[in-house]
Image: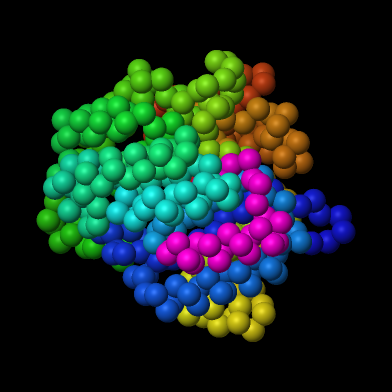
Amino acid sequence: MSAFSSPVPSLYVHVPFCAAKCEYCAFFSELSSGEQMNRFVDALIREMELVASSLKPRTIFFGGGTPSLLSTAQWRRVLVAMERLDLLGADEWTVECNPATVSTEKAKLLREHGVNRISMGVQSLDEGLLDRLGRIHSREMVFKSFDRLRAAGLDNINLDLMFAIPGQTMDIWKATMAETIAMGCEHLSCYEVIYEEDTPLYEQLQAGEFDVDEALACAMYDELIDTAAAAGFAQYEVANFARHDGEPNAELPSRASRHNVNYWRGGACQALGPSASGYVDGRRIRNIANTERYCEQLALGQRAHESVEQLSPLASAGETAAFGLRMNAGWPFELFEQTTGHDLRAEWAGDMQRVVESNWGVRSDERFHLTRLGMRFADTVAEWFIRPEP
């Protein structure tokens, strides 16, 4: 860190191991093996040592892969290292879990070291759809794991769900939402299935084994927004819904993921682990998407970067504009200017007008935000706001 940079407030750690590869997943991950996981932990601790002086994490997020696959002993090594490097004490510390890999001992260990938020990949509560997705957990495991996490003192739990899964009917989707909400979680992340190349689900689609029903997907998304609102969840981003304990008119629900809000608002984030992608001092930094090579580089005492891209101020501002519009609050003009040094009303006036004319956005004196319909097309809007490097 240069003498003039302020400490990076967010830390993301990618744990690349999975017990099985899901049918829809295009993220970098690999099947777990004890020896490779030990080597990864060694490398991760080295990488933490290299960046610790530039970090003062207010939010931490361990994602994957499946971070909960690390053994209790491996987790203990990581946590002891973080304590030594003064990386504990974040306001919000999330760890992703698979319902099949949550033990009471592990949950207690994480809680004792300051983990205060869990994100559990449920995807569905329908046994047939769990098989269809290649998930290794049963619906029963979801309920048991949720109870274990609560017993360990974790009172901020996000549950991930998927909709528009091949074979998923509206009735199955409604039943899954009802059962999930009845569990009493604080946060929901709900994603439409995306068919990405090099995944089994994409190959099945190409082979004509099923069709994509766009109208049903839209209806399921509408049902999600209405059901979540009726159950007391406030939508604050395209796919994210949170309960509200605090001020009813606050811009963000109190249980919103602060770590993700930092991303969407253009904040800096240091990212560790194979394939992890961070943003520090206007640079987009991506690590090698190969655990073997990641471990080798760090054994030599150097970061395992695949690419470091210095964004121009305008390109950086365009990315920040695009990400921030995924949030229901959109961009207050003053906040955008404080964050990027650019005026949304000047550089993006034509793009805002185009969104408004499509009935996808609303512009007031204070801010610009997407409508309920516009949220469905947030990815398209994002492309309009991106500015290429000069």
Residue in the foreground of this view, choosing between 110 and 29: 110
Q: Residue at x 31, y 64 (%)?
A: 19
Task: Give the vertical position of 151 relative to 200 (above or below).
Answer: above
Residue 251, position as x, y percentages in the image: 59, 23
Q: Residue at x 55, y 59 (%)?
A: 13
Residue 147, by quadrant, is top left
Residue in the foreground of this view, choosing between 32 and 6: 32
Task: Give the vertical position of 289 relative to 221 (above or below).
Answer: below
Q: Is 345 on the left or on the right of 151, as rendered?
A: right
Q: Residue at x 15, y 61 (%)?
A: 207
Residue 101, position as x, y percentages in the image: 34, 56
- Taking the magenta stretch, the answer to whether it contains residue 91 is yes
First to last magenta residue range: 70-94
Q: Quadrant of the C terminus?
A: bottom right
- Taking the magenta stretch, the answer to whether it contains residue 56 is no
Residue in the foreground of this view, choosing between 260 and 255: 255
Residue 183, position as x, y percentages in the image: 32, 31
Task: Give the vertical position of 289 relative to 11 (above or below).
Answer: below
Q: Residue at x 40, y 42 (%)?
A: 149
Q: Is 72 on the left or on the right of 176, as rendered?
A: right
In the image, farthest residue toward the top: 248
Q: Is 331 on the left or on the right of 177, as rendered?
A: right
